[in-house]
Amino acid sequence: MIAQDVLQNSSAVINVDLNAIINNYQILSGRSSSADCAAVVKANAYGMGLEHVASAIFHNTKCKIFFVANLKEAVALRSSIKDAIIYVFNGLFPDQIECYLDHNIRPVLNDLSQIKMWQGKAEPCAIHFDTGINRLGLSDQQTEQFLNSETNLNLALILSHLIASDLPDDADNKIQLNKFKKITDALPDVPASLCNSAGIYLGKDYHFNLLRPGIMLYGGNPRALALPQGIKPVFEIMGKILQIRHLETGSSVGYNALWTAKKPSRIALINVGYADGYLKLNDNRGLVFVCDQIVAVIGKVSMDMIAIDITGHEFDKLMPEDEVELIGKNITLEMASEVSTLGHYELLTSVRDRVYRNYKLEADT
Ligand SMILES: *Cc1c(COP(=O)(O)O)cnc(C)c1O
């Protein structure tokens, strides 16, 4: 019997709680009584799986607007949700125009030449005005030029992006807000959007007409402060023990013998490695949770496995196939972030497709 479960259980598993994502959307959208709330689902919904995540949000909340980074993600999203409004942050290349139109996808136009390409079309678009990030968007000079020229666009949204929304006291927030206000004043009839997740918590001056949260939908925390009230963790990543070994004092583990047993030791090999997104920053540093204990990753992270130190009687009952928690209730995102130096954005988006994504979605009762 080749049950689906047998195959799924051969890899590490990420359990994604879609109800928690829906909950987080409600919390974030509830921060504003006037602004609408979109969902940012770029990078495979921050590693959680685009199709399942976007469908859960679309069908269980009032969210109708989604943002992705590129056209490939947009077309994938369109094939699973026919009626969503989909914007693409990364803008427009000339050879993409037809594809945008065919799939009813809206470009975020990032400079005057992209605006020119969309000129005269009835289909909606957005424009990104750069208010300080010096990434995508119209520069000050281009903004000036745009505001002083005649355009023939169906402009459905204008947006800008904050550079320091994770730092509530940073002076750049106010500077960008004031710059963006000048632009929205010049375009009073066009809906405007400034806030990512952390921006939502800067207060209602920042909300305008549309919120654009990403990371907090997925329970990630962009700020050094505690996660806001009501935002729930969304996922856990579980590995499985492949093998248990006894080591003599002086034996080493893994490539380049990065770890050596100082006493007779027992180790377990776990079915997750850097090819699953468990990165080398965890060499001799990572933590996992098993038998109610926090346990150290020892030696180098390999492509397909890690080793953990399970010396001690509390681990006597452990056997191959037993589960260990890599991220979850016990090894929280905060802890995983601290030991690896990776931010929550990186921890989420580094989960690779070899990790089986298992979804929970319970109907409202
Ligand atoms: C990724 C992104 C967002 C979402 O940001 P979070 O910090 O994940 O909430 C919003 N706007 C733009 C332009 C982005 O690139």
Image (cartoon, rainbow, N blue to C red):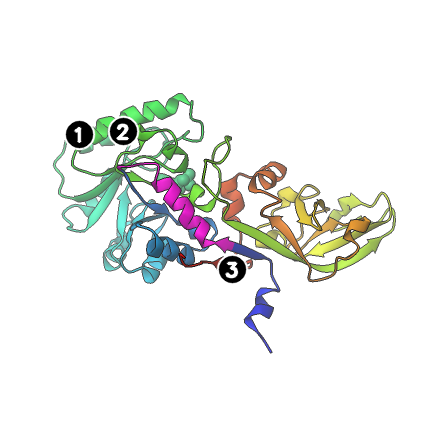
Residue 45 colored in magenta in the image: no
Quarter holding the C terminus is: bottom left
- SS under mark 2: helix
Q: Is residue 351 above or below residue 320?
A: above
Q: Is residue 113 visible?
A: no
Q: Nearer the viewer, mark 3 or mark 1?
A: 3
- The residues colored magenta run 16-34
* Main secondary structure found in the magenta portion: helix
- Which residue bears the numbered disc 2? 180
Binning the other alpha carbons within 10 Å of mark 2 as few (below 14), some (14 to 19) or many (20 upward) gives: many
Q: Is residue 223 left or right of residue 148?
A: right
The mark that comes first in sequence, 3 or 2, is 2
- Which residue bears the numbered disc 1? 186
- SS under mark 1: helix
- Which residue bears the numbered disc 3? 358
Q: Is residue 83 visible?
A: yes
Depth check, front residue: 85 or 22: 22
Mark 3 to mark 1 CA distance (whole Å):
47 Å
The mark that comes first in sequence, 3 or 1, is 1
The x and y percentages for residue 21 are: 43, 49
